[in-house]
Amino acid sequence: MLLNKESGSELRIYGCTRAASAALSHCACIVFTVTIALLSRPGTSWFSWHPFFMTLGFSFFMTEAILLFSPRGSPLKTLPHKTKSRAHWILQCLCVTCAILGLAAIVYNKHLSGKPHFTSWHGLLGVIAVCAVALQSLAAVPLIYHSLAKGWSLAKLKRYHAATGLVAYLLGSGSLLLGLRSAWFTGSAGEHTWYLAAACCAFNALVVMNQVSSAYTAKKRLQS
């Protein structure tokens, strides 16, 4: 009886911790995106669109798309899974659109200034992240229209989609973190702003990793 009470208390604490983490993640992605928008002032130059769109895509839309499936932090947790899946795909399409626009902005800006393209780790990782999230979103179409995936079970498709999605998200987060080391950001933001932005980005990555790994670890336990 005592063991049952202790396990029940642990589950409640664990549940509250995950709910608090998801809520903080929602706040973190908003704070990070707004901070970059205020610093970049989109529309003041071609370059200004690059950090704005990249942050809006990877930090806001992609984070929110993944948090839709959070068991304790989803804003749509009372809705059917099919509705969440459609909303997730729409947010992912917005993420891809923003990522492509952000990439186009920096490419055109480099072209105007006559500078070489993708010479830094930030640039290389960024273009890889854009390609990865675009391909991953296209590969998700069979999850919506399962008849397109002949010979593949829905469970296997979801497992691969979650794994590749996590990789794409971490690539995007890594690119954003490297962008915080750029001359533009270090010259525009103060020390406290830098630490706040880095903490928001890193925290979201940890929450997403925990959500994806916990979901599929739980499924394996149920199947074993």
Image: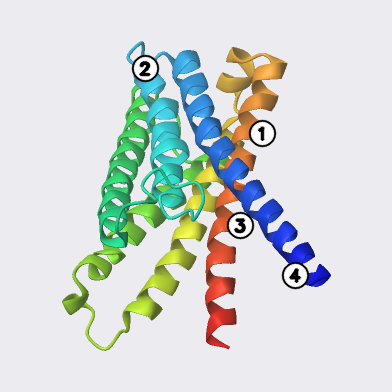
**Marks 1 and 2, how far apart at CA:** 23 Å
Dot 4 corresponds to which residue? 4
Assess whether mark 2 and mark 1 are in contact (beta carbons under 8 angstroms).
no
Task: Kindly report which numbered mark, 4 or 2, lies closer to the viewer in this rendering.
Answer: 4
Please tell me in which quadrant of the rendered image residue 82 appears.
Answer: bottom left
Dot 4: what SS?
helix
Task: Kindly report which numbered mark, 3 or 1, lies closer to the viewer in this rendering.
Answer: 3
> Label 1: how many residues lie within 10 Å, few (<14), some (14-19) or many (20+)?
some
Please tell me in which quadrant of the rendered image residue 61 appears.
Answer: top left
Identify the residue at horizontal 31%, vertical 35% (top origin): 104
Q: Is residue 27 above or below residue 132?
A: above
**Marks 4 and 3, how far apart at CA:** 26 Å
Q: Which mark is residue 108?
A: none
Please tell me in which quadrant of the rendered image residue 165 appears.
Answer: bottom left
Dot 2 corresponds to which residue? 42
Residue 143 location (% of width, % of height) = 27, 69
In the image, 152 versus 173, the foreground residue is 152
Taking the view exactly as shown, the residue that stands out farthest to the front is 1
Taking the view exactly as shown, the residue that stands out farthest to the right is 2
Q: Which mark is residue 199?
A: 1
Dot 3 corresponds to which residue? 210
Identify the residue at horizontal 49%, vertical 67% (top origin): 163
Residue 19 location (% of width, % of height) = 58, 46
User: Looking at the image, is mark 1 or mark 2 earlier in the sequence?
Assistant: 2
**Marks 3 and 1, how far apart at CA:** 16 Å
